[in-house]
Image: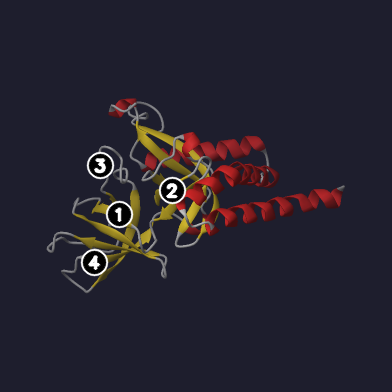
């Protein structure tokens, strides 16, 4: 019985890998939806079971996730409690797999209100946006993906630009619109966003400038992402404006 108990996490982990692979090997959108309907609930259940087997104590796990969610709300500039805390409707989810082309799978889909174009972030900063939502899982394109293009601004000067991914280096590149805008190492870059929260919610930390390309007067800079893409776990999906923002 002891040997069987020790084998269980490994078996569950293998099952999770196979289910995630099945989801990502399917490229056509109708087939992705069908795959999500079949494999999504199993993938989420296996992922949850693996986390349950590995966690030290249920109460500590719940407290840790609650702290992470509160940090995520603060990343949007909203207090975890008090006035304004319901300006956004958010949903916690877990990353259950890494896919090709800088994508991840989360264990929440249309059944939980997740839809295309929604912002995903963690307690550190922007993760990316939802590019496909199945019944029980969703695919998120990471901000570091080459195909990613995010409206952004420098936090202090509010100069606007566009951030794209540099996946081979795990970095981001900022291109400012104003040719005379000043940018320097250490500057924080946040999302430009919009009142509707799509294509991305405003003022979510994207990254910090680590190098200005081309010397003085350049409008291009490299960023170190705020999010820790190598260790993603609990994330937050912005479902839409809350009552305080006039949403439903």
Residue 61: x and y in percent read 61, 39
**Nearer mark to the viewer, of 3 and 2:** 2
Q: Earlier in the sequence, mark 1 or mark 4?
A: 1
Q: Which residue is mark 2?
A: 132
Residue on which the image places disc 1:
150
Compared across the picture, whether 231 is left or right of 245 comes to: right
Q: CA distance from mark 1 to mark 4?
A: 14 Å
Are circles 1 and 3 on residues that touch, CB within 8 Å?
Answer: no
Q: Look at the picture and state if 27 lies above or below 113.
A: below
Tag 3 and tag 4, C-beta contact below 8 Å: no
Query: Does the residue at mark 1 contact the one at mark 4 (Cβ under 8 Å)?
Result: no
Q: Which residue is mark 4?
A: 220
Residue 97, above or below 81: below
- SS category of the residue bearing label 3: loop
Residue found at x 48% / y 49%: 30
Give residue 158's position: percent from left, percent from top: 19, 50
Q: CA distance from mark 3 to mark 4?
A: 23 Å
Residue 109, given in percent of the width and then of the height, sits at: 49, 40
Q: Kindly state the secondary structure of the residue where label 1 is placed.
A: strand
Relative to 28, residue 246 above or below: above
Q: Could you tell which of marks 2 and 4 lies nearer the N-terminus? A: 2
The x, y position of residue 54, in whole percent, is: 68, 47
> Dot 2 lies on which element?
strand
Q: CA distance from mark 1 to mark 2?
A: 17 Å
């Amino acid at each position: 019985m002891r040997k069987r108990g020790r084998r269980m996490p490994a078996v569950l982990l293998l099952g999770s890998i196979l289910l995630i692979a099945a989801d990502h090997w399917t490229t056509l959108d109708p087939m992705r939806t069908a795959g999500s309907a079949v494999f999504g609930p199993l993938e989420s259940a296996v992922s949850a079971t693996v986390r349950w087997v590995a966690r030290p104590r249920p109460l500590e796990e719940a407290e840790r996730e609650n702290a992470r969610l509160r940090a995520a709300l603060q990343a949007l500039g909203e207090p975890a409690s008090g006035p304004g805390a319901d300006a956004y409707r958010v949903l916690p989810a877990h990353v259950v797999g890494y896919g090709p082309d800088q994508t991840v799978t989360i264990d929440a889909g249309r059944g939980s209100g997740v839809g295309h174009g929604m912002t995903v972030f963690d307690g550190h900063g922007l993760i990316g946006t939802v590019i496909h939502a199945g019944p029980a899982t969703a695919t998120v394109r990471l901000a570091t993906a080459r195909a990613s293009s995010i409206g952004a601004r420098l936090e202090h000067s509010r100069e606007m630009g566009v951030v794209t991914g540099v996946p081979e280096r795990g970095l981001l590149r900022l291109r400012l619109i104003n040719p005379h805008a000043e940018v320097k190492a250490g500057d924080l870059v946040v999302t430009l966003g919009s009142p509707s929260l799509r294509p991305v919610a405003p003022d979510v930390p994207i990254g910090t400038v680590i190098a200005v390309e081309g010397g003085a007067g350049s409008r291009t800079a490299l960023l170190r992402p705020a999010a820790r893409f190598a260790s993603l776990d609990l994330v937050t999906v912005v479902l839409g404006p809350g009552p305080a923002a006039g949403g439903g």
